[in-house]
Image (spheres, grey):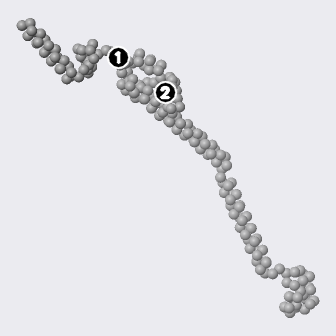
Amino acid sequence: MKKEDLIALGLSEEQADKVIAGFGTMVPKSRLDDKINEVKDLTNQLKERDTQLNDLKKIDAAGLQTKIEELQQQNETDKAEYEAKIKDTQLKSALKLALASKVHDTDLVTGLIDKSTIELDEEGNVKKGLDEQIKTLRESKAFLFTPETEEKPLPKGTKPGEGKNDDKPSTSISAQIAQQLNTRSQSSETKTIWD
C-alpha cells in the first residue's frame, strides 16, 4: 500500500507516514498468495525428491550391477548354445546326405562318427574329415555299409534286344519273320529242283 491508500482509508498524514516508516511499501494480497503457493510447490518438490532419493538408496546398486552381469552372461550362453544347436543340426543333415546311399542305417553310423573333426563348406556340405572315418568304419564294421556294386557283365540274352543275332544289326520282328519265310521258301524251291 501506498501513503495515499492509507490516507484514503481514513488515517491522518502523520499516521500514514508512521505506518510506511514501520512497514515500508506493502505487497498486495494476491502477490503474497502467489508467493505462498510458490513456496508450497517448492516444498512439495523437495519432499518428492527426498522420497525418490530414499527409494534409490533402498535399491542395491551393487546388486543391480551383479544382476546385469548375470543377464549378460546368460544371454551370451544362450547365444552360444543356439549357435551350437544350429551347427549340430547342419552337421547331422550334411552327414545323413553324405551317407545316404553308402550305409544301411544313417542314424547309427552318424552316431559313430567324430563330428568335431568334420568341416562343412558354405553350402553346408561335408568338406573334409568324413572319408577317413568312413574308411576306418568300413574296415572295422563292414556290416553297416551297403556293398559296393561293381559293373559285372550280364549273360547274353538278359538285356532287351540282345539275342542270337549279335553280329547282325537288330531288325524288327516282322522283318525277321519275313526273312525266315524267304529262307524257307528258297530252301523248298531248291529241294523241288533236285527232287
Look at the picture and state if 53 lies above or below 129: below
Look at the picture and state if 52 lies above or below 155: below
Q: Is residue 114 left or right of residue 77?
A: left
Mark 1, residues whose alpha carbon is within 10 Å: few (<14), some, or many (≥20)?
few
Residue in front for this viewpoint, 56 or 69? 69
| Mark in the foreground, 1 or 2 | 1
Q: Residue at x 47, y 23 (%)?
A: 130
Name the spot of residue 17 as percent of width and height, x first: 92, 86
Q: Quadrant of residue 33?
A: bottom right
Residue 111 in view of the camera = no
For marks 1 and 2 on the same chain, the one whose residue lies earlier in the sequence: 2
Q: Quadrant of residue 9?
A: bottom right
Name the spot of residue 108 as percent of width and height, x first: 39, 26
Residue in front for this viewpoint, 178 or 168? 178
> In terms of secondary structure, where does tag 2 sit?
strand
Tag of residue 126: 2
Are the residues flagged by discs 1 and 2 in contact, CB closer than 8 Å? no
Give the labeled residue for mark 1. 151
Residue 40 in view of the camera = yes
Q: Residue at x 13, y 11 (%)?
A: 187
- Amino acid type, residue under disc 1 in the picture: Glu
Q: Residue at x 49, y 31 (%)?
A: 124
> In terms of secondary structure, where does tag 1 sit?
loop
Mark 2, residues whose alpha carbon is within 10 Å: few (<14), some, or many (≥20)?
many
Q: Is residue 170 left or right of residue 130?
A: left
Tag of residue 95: none
